[in-house]
Amino acid sequence: MYQIPQDCWNANITPLHKGGSCNSISSYQLISHTSVAGKILEGIMNTHIVKHLTTNELLSDSQHGFRHGCLVYTNLIDLYDYVTEHLDQAILVDLVLLDFAKAFNKVCHC
């Protein structure tokens, strides 16, 4: 089993003021500065994981988040095509839209 060196996990945190009251914690975005070795390791792992998922066809065609040539815009175009096609055929379409904009601010990082 491989073990990741502790230096790859360590990071310097810099608070970046987003606006609003300087006394409110929610007015700051925390920026994590990790080591160069950690970033290189992350890139290598990402490449291998994406290659494995793509090669073994484990990703849905609607997954656009991190795939080469697939952007948020292409995902929206696919959704628009799907919805308009079904509405043209008088088929009901239900959508559930979730906003994860601040999801990582809610995660306990201890």
Image (tube, rainbow, N blue to C red):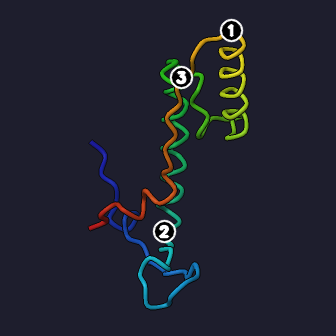
Q: Which residue is mark 2?
A: 35
The local crowd at label 2, few if under 14, some if 14 to 19, many if 20 or more residues have their Cα within 10 Å, is some
| Nearer-the-camera pick, 3 or 33 | 33
Q: Secondary structure at mark 2?
A: loop
Q: Residue furthest bottom?
A: 23
Mark 1 or 2, which is nearer the eye? Answer: 1
Q: Residue furthest top?
A: 89
In which quadrant is the C terminus drawn?
bottom left
Q: Quadrant of residue 88?
A: top right
Left or right position of 75 against 1: right
Between discs 3 and 2, the one toward the N terminus: 2
Separation of marks 3 and 2 at Cα, in angstroms: 33 Å
Q: Hey, what amino acid is under mark 2?
A: Ser
| Nearer-the-camera pick, 82 or 35 | 82
Picture coordinates of residue 96, whole percent (x, y): 49, 35
Q: Residue at x 44, y 77 (%)?
A: 13
Q: Secondary structure at mark 1?
A: loop
Q: Secondary structure at mark 3?
A: loop
Q: Hey, what amino acid is under mark 3?
A: Ser
In which quadrant is the N terminus drawn?
top left
Q: Residue at x 29, y 64 (%)?
A: 108
Q: Which residue is mark 3?
A: 60
54, above or below 13, in the image: above
Q: Hey, what amino acid is under mark 1?
A: Gln
Q: Residue at x 50, y 49 (%)?
A: 99
